[in-house]
Amino acid sequence: MCGIFAYLNYNVTRERRYILEVLFNGLRRLEYRGYDSAGISIDSSDSDSPPLVFRQEGNIESLVKSVYQDVAATDLNLEESFSVHAGISHTRWATHGEPAPRNSHPQSSDAGNEFLVVHNGVITNYEVLKETLLRHGFTFESETDTEVIPKLAKFVFDKANEEGDQSVTFSQVVLEVIRHLEGAYALIFKSRHYPTELIACKRGSPLLLGVKDLEEEASAESSFSDAKFPSSNGQPKELFLSSDANALVEHTKKVLVIEDGEVVHIKDGGVSIYKFDQAKNNHGGTLSRPASVQRALSILEMEVEQINKGKYEHYMQKEIHEQPESLTTTMRGRLIRGGSCKAKTVLLGGLKDHLKTIRRSRRILFIGCGTSYNAALAARSILEELSGIPVTMEIASDLVDRQGPIYREDTAVFVSQSGETADTLLALEYALENGALCVGITNTVGSAIARHTHCGVHINAGCEIGVASTKAYTSQIVVMAMLALAIGGDTLSNQARREAIIDGLFDLPSKVKEVLKLDEEMKDLAKLLIAEQSLLVFGRGYNYATALEGALKVKEVALMHSEGILAGEMKHGPLALVDENLPIVVIATRDACFSKQQSVIQQLHARKGRLIVMCTEGDAASVSVGGSCRVIEVPQVADCLQPVINVVPLQLLAYHLTVLRGYNVDQPRNLAKSVTTQ
């Protein structure tokens, strides 16, 4: 969704050109989140003049170009130095109002830019606030929900001054503003009344604070207090605020994950953190300030190399080819094979204290959206088989919409690559209210789902930049297969099955390396499909999820209509679409459903279907009727792990189709990496 980045230098001299480039590069690191416009705000040369605001529709380079054009036209001195300066920037993914400069952020309180705000999220009561502000004489320039926020800040500030409170602080103004806001948000405030100060706050949308002490790096164990961050002793430092860690890691690894309801006030090189409780603070009267709280810095487990493309042309391409390594990392330290007792077991440290409770569950619910839902679906069968517990699938938004029943005896597993998915978070809140044991499966340490679930497993797939998830999907399947092994226990009846799966997990990275050798073959297939309008993908059993995910990848990035279909439903409607022109992928690798898929192929061939069949190596003759089908052969693994192998050729197909069709493979149209609004 929207990306927020802010940079504040304290007692370290930085030129305006440097400040601009830091802000621009911060936005570039957030590009993958998806956006359609961008903007920044920096200080003018004259302290009495309003902050400068630049906003532009389109990509970040369009913003950069327009800023430097404006700078040249106004003779703004890019070499001017600031010992203290606070700049903010934003990439917008349109929700309220079309992509246009007037709707881009920062949004302003007035022509004088007294208060500026960048925002990720949605303010659900903005219409009511807007009506109130209109009655008080405010005029609105944009169609956004965000514009009410800076205008409300100005209203609060002006009212306090009219009542003679000349000492009202920036944090008091912001606290009063957020008392009136409903919905989800991550916000950064900048004001000409409080130069060189920034305030950040959040509820539901991600926001991190990064700290770089230029003289003496603070210990990871240091904590913040009202007066210290870690100290206000005049030491030169740089402070950063960002929607995610990708924009911070090149500057510092020392971060604070801002919690919901926290207000972070940066002033004079120090940081004050206040905990805002909406329920306790819905009162009128004088402006109040809650007590400050202490928080500890954490260290990012990320390297700059992870957010670079390396030898690859695109992030999606890089992440597809990284899967042997990402799967190895996902399993590292969790699979045990050998030892004195020659045991083959799984150890998931984040779940060990809750396994007994999970095993006693009346049912397990998998809850997710999009690719994460598909990954859970791929693991559903093996979890049911090994645990004997009924497993139900829930799309997060649908569960919340219909308020589906969840009980105290249930275990709810929340699957989200980012750990910040808005619909999944709402479903988590709902499940917690109903007393279920909540388990998180995410790729993001410190994310909202990781923090608010009772227990969980990080998939450790590494940073994923491409909007269309690839390596996170396969790592999610592997984690959930290990979850099934952990819950299933070591009963004699399923010992052989368990050991075969564990052996298959050990071999999986090398098998993925083998299937990646199909890259050129999938590029050739993409050339044949480049002009097609639609693609059907049939799967069943473990590979119904593969059909859904493969079709989703083509849909997301190649902008081609594609549909994943349960092969058992073929004769209940989809068969009407079959002719000699429509390309159809049938997944028919060796498993319990193989003979049924052979029958599907026969029926499609009888209707002159244009077939592309994915089969196990050596099975080409068994699936290609009279040699009429195009065949993709893949290595065989344990049936519950086969979806990891089978999805890779479809990922490659989607990638090559997109590049050949001339679309942006890393930032597909209208999509965002992390969906943090409903």
Image (cartoon, grey):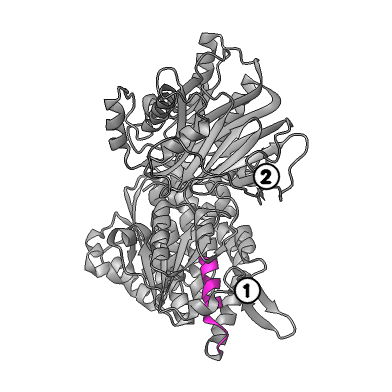
> Is residue 10 depicted above or below 396 in this figure?
above
Q: Which mark is residue 191?
A: none
Q: Residues within 10 Å of mark 1 (few under 14, many from 20)?
A: some
Considering every residue shown, the one lying at the far right of the view is 216
Say which residue label 1 marks. 347
**Residue 176, horizontal then vertical, whole percent:** 43, 36
Q: Amino acid at mark 1?
A: Leu
Pinpoint residue 384: horizontal percent, then vertical percent: 44, 78
Magenta stretch contains residue 479 = yes
Name the secondary structure under disc 1. Answer: loop
Is residue 436 visible in the rendered image? The answer is yes
Taking 249 as reference, is 71 above or below it? above
In the rendering, which numbered label is found on residue 253?
2
Tell me the quarter of the picture where residue 249 sits. top right
Q: Amino acid at mark 2?
A: Lys
Is 302 on the left or on the right of 153, as rendered?
Answer: right
Task: Report the residue at 71% width, 51% height from top.
Answer: 221
Residue at the spot 49% in from the left edge and 34% down from the top edge: 172
Q: Is residue 550 visible?
A: no
Query: For the stretch drawn in magenta, what is the main secondary structure?
Result: helix
Q: Is residue 164 above or below residue 309?
A: above
